[in-house]
Amino acid sequence: MAQIVGAIATSHIPAIGKAIAEKKQNDPYWKPFFDGYDKAIAWLRQARPDVVVMIYNDHGLNFFLDKMPTFAVGAAAQYRSEDEGWGLPVQSSFPGDADLSWHVIESLVADEFDIVSCQDMAVDHGFTVPMTLMFPDAGGKWPVKTLPVSINTVQHPLPSPARCWKLGRAIGRAIESYPKDLRVVVFGTGGLSHQLDGTRAGFINKKFDLYCLETIVKDPEAFSKLSVVDLVREAGAQGVEFLNWIAMRGTLLGSVSKIHSNYHIPISNTAGATLVLENRAAVQTQAA
Amino acid sequence: MQHHDIPGTVVFDGTQAQKGYALNAMCYSFNAAANRDAFTRDEDAYCAKFGLNEEQRAAIRERNVLKLLAAGGNVYYLAKFAGILKLNVQDIGAQQTGMTVDAFKDMLAAAGRQ
């Protein structure tokens, strides 16, 4: 059976992708941020994932306002990286696992999550930056298959934190009912607090971020009491990307422990963060 | 949209999405280099092709982010317009808050020392 061995949450700020392309990891501005990834990358390497489920948000590459799905799931053999308009290098395509995707889609719809399925999907920095961050030696040959799950954080109404938590639970059940022996790591990307628009641009809320980093490990259902407006107020208009982290945490059905975290202000206009969680099956099933 | 009283924050909801559709459609087209070039070559013709209203056209002409937001622009699509102008998110943050870019960057860094 497929098994979710853990999860990684990480910021996906475009400037990170540019810094990687320009090899600025050791610049004084970037070092405190990139140093926080060494342990995460080492954990991921030993976790030996076959598949990464990427829970992220599209920022106007694959989806426009003409058709804006609340939840969309990739079902393609390949996912394209494309020009986003402001200079982030285009990556080589990311392999998909269409069989796994359709299993997850069947399971989610049976579980009353009426998602949009996408056989043709471009993935933007919300997906590509975490991949380049976490697989620094890939050199364009990605060592895992991928399964994109996009949550609408662009056009309100957005799904509530409670709904994203439940989506995560349903994805967890879907993956763990897949009959092939696959090791799966779930990524939740974006955040933490930031706001790009309005006269409150530049808003960062360290106190709330630190609360989130702790609570998402120990008491993730606490976020289900928050509204989207609460998230906008506390995390900023774009800090609502924390919904992706909540869904990521929801996929972990076993006993969860924190392996590593890092938090650094500022990266671009954002509080940069990463978190690594290990997931141990609640009931150990004995292999014959 | 649920009522909110968050200062300095436009929540991009159905009202804004309807108002800003043409403007955002134009900015979405800037994902393609050929479209960015076409805009640069003849800004008036490009805006006309997407049917921008006078408020949106004026906000584009003035490169004024707060006016673009008021005209229904969404920051993720507007970022692609900012890309044509070679402005990053600190530049547009400074413009919206009436600060210098250096002062805006200092404010971001100060949030880490709280």
Image (cartoon, coloured by chain):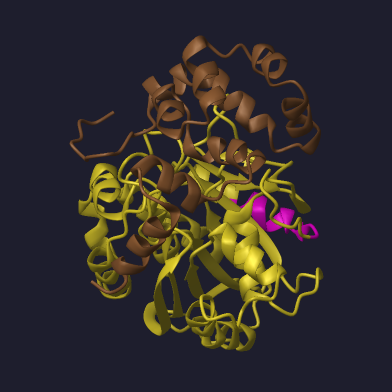
Q: Residue at x 74, y 80 (%)?
A: A137
Vertical relation: A86 (above or below) A193: above
Q: Which chain is yellow?
A: A
**Residue B20: image location, x then y, percent:** 48, 21
Q: Residue at x 76, y 30 (%)?
A: B35
Magenta segment, which residues? A92-104
**Residue A128: image location, x then y, percent:** 65, 60
Residue A178 appears anywhere in the view: no
Q: Quadrant of the N terminus of chain A?
A: bottom right
Vertical relation: A100 (above or below) A218: above
Quadrant of res B8: top left
Front-most of residues A278 and A113: A278
Q: Is residue A84 left or right of residue A150?
A: right
Q: Which chain is brown?
A: B
Front-most of residues B98 and A61: B98
Q: Quadrant of the C terminus of chain A?
A: bottom right
Q: Residue at x 47, y 59 (%)?
A: A190
**Residue B111: image location, x then y, percent:** 30, 66
The tally of labels here is 0
Q: Is residue A37 left or right of residue A279?
A: right
Vertical relation: A174 (above or below) A184: above
Residue B59 appears anywhere in the view: yes
Residue A101 in magenta stretch: yes
Residue A88 in magenta stretch: no
